[in-house]
Amino acid sequence: MSGIDEEARRGQYQEYLKAELEAAAVYSALAETEKDADRAEVFQQLVVSEMRHAARWAQKLGVDLQSLEPGSFGLKVRVVQWLARLLGTGRVVPLLLRGEAREISTYAADPEARDLVTEEREHARMLQGLARAGPRDKTRHSRGGLAGGGGSLRAAVLGVNDGLVSNFSLVMGVAGGTGNADIVLLAGVAGLLAGAFSMAAGEYVSVRSQREIYENEIRKERIELQEWPEEEEEELVLIYRAKGLSQEEARQVAKRLMADPEVALDTMAREEMGLNPSQLGSPWGASLSSFVAFVVGAIFPILPYIFNAGNLAFSLSAFLSAGALVAVGGLLALVSGRNVAWGALRMLLVGGSAAAVTFGVGSFIGVSVSR
C-alpha cells in the first residue's frame, strides 16, 4: 500500500471513529433523558455497541483503547437531548435512523467495514422499535376513536367543509359581479362538480399509491421473515422489550409469534410499520366518500338558486352557508375535543371572510366590466 493510500485509509478510520463516538454520545444522552428504565437500557445497549465499533477503528489508528470514551456533549448532542426532553425520545429517534442509514450505506461500500453492516442494521431495528413503542402509541390506542371511526368522521367533515367554503366563496364572488341568477347557478354547479371530481381523483391516486407502498413494505417484510428469521425474531424481542416486557417475556412472545409465519407477518406489519394488513384503505371507497362529502358541502350555497328563490336567492344562500359553517365548525371542534362554540365561531369567521373577500372582488370586477 502506498503512502498516499495509507494516509487516505487512516483519514477514513478517523472519520469512522469520530462518527461512532458521536453516536455513542447521542445514545448516552438519550439514555440519561429517558425516564422509562427499559427504553433507557436499550439506549445503553446501543452505546456499548457503538463503542465496540469505535474500538475497532481506534485499534487500527493505534489509539489507546483504555482512553476511549463517547464523544463530548457537543452542539449536536445537546440539541438532540434538548429535543428529547421537549418532545420525548420517541419523536427524536426517527432523526437518528437517518444517521444509521448513512452508516449502513458507508460501511457496505467499504470491504474493511462490511462485516459491521449486520450490526448497524440491528441498531436501526432497535431504533425503529423505540420509535414505535414511544408515548405516541399510548395516545393512539387510548384515543382509538380518532384513529378509527372518529378519524373517518373527521375526514368526512373536513371534506364537507372544503366543498362548503370553496363553493360559498365562488357563489358570492360571481353574485357580486352579476345579478343574473342563472349565471350564479351555472358557476355554482360547475364549482361543485369540478371540486368534487378533483377531490375524488386526488383521493383515489393518493390512497392507491399509499396502498401500493404498504403492500410493497409487507411483501419485503415477508421476504425478510423467510430469509432472516433469527434477525426478525430479535427485532420482535426488542420491540416488546421497549414496550416494557422483561427479556425472558419478550423472548417467549417472539418465539410464539414466529412459530406461525402468517401471524409473525401480521405482527411485524403492525408493530414495525404501524399497519393493519386487513385495513390498508380502499381507493374507490376513499374516492367516493370524498366526492360525496364535497358535494354535501358545496350544495348549500346553490340551493336557493336551484329552487329559484328569486331576489331572496342571494340572502338565503348566505344564510344557509353561514349556518352550515357554524354546524361544520362545531362538529369539527367536537370531534377534536375542542370548545364547540369557539370552533363554530372560528369557522364562521374564516368562511365568511373568504366569501366577503370574493364578493368584494366580484363586485369590483363587475363594475369595471359594466363600464
Image: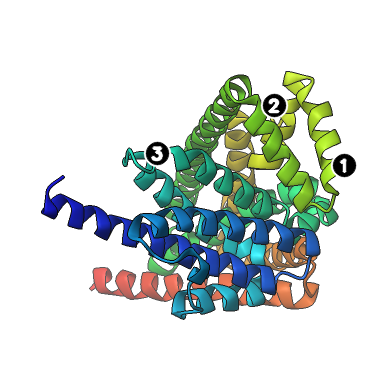
Nearer-the-camera pick, 328 or 238:
238
Residue drawn at (57%, 35%), measured in percent from left and top?
A: 287
**Mark seen at residue 249:** 1
In this rendering, the answer to whether 153 lies above or below 336 is: above
Report the Cα–Cα distance between label 1 and label 2: 20 Å
Q: Quadrant of the N terminus?
A: top left
Q: Secondary structure at mark 2?
A: helix
Whether residues under marks 3 and 1 lie with C-beta atoms below 8 angstroms apart, the answer is: no
The amino acid sitting under disc 1 is Glu
Q: Secondary structure at mark 3?
A: helix
Q: Which mark is residue 118?
A: none
Classify residue 350 by image quadrant: bottom right
Q: Secondary structure at mark 1?
A: helix
Quarter of the rendering occupied by the C terminus: bottom left
**Left or right: 94, with 334 as reference point:** left
Give the residue drawn at x 51%, y 33%.
213
Count residues near mark 1 (Cα–Cα under 10 Å), then give few for <14, some for 14-19, many for 20+. Answer: few
Place of residue 117 in the rendered image (x, y in percent of width and height, measured from the top left): 46, 41
Give the mark nearest the N terminus, 3 or 2. Answer: 3
Per the rendering, the mark at residue 114 is 3
Comparing 360 with 226, the one in front is 226
Label ID, residue 265 = 2
**Which residue type does callout 2 highlight?**
Leu
Q: Residue at x 56, y 62 (%)?
A: 165
Per the model, the C-alpha gap separating discs 3 and 1 is 33 Å
Residue 362 place in picture, x, y as percent? 38, 69
Q: Position of residue 308 (x, y in %)?
A: 59, 52
Disc 2 crowd rating (10 Å Cα; few below 14, some 14-19, many 20+) is many
Please state if 95 lies on the left or on the right of 239 as rendered: left
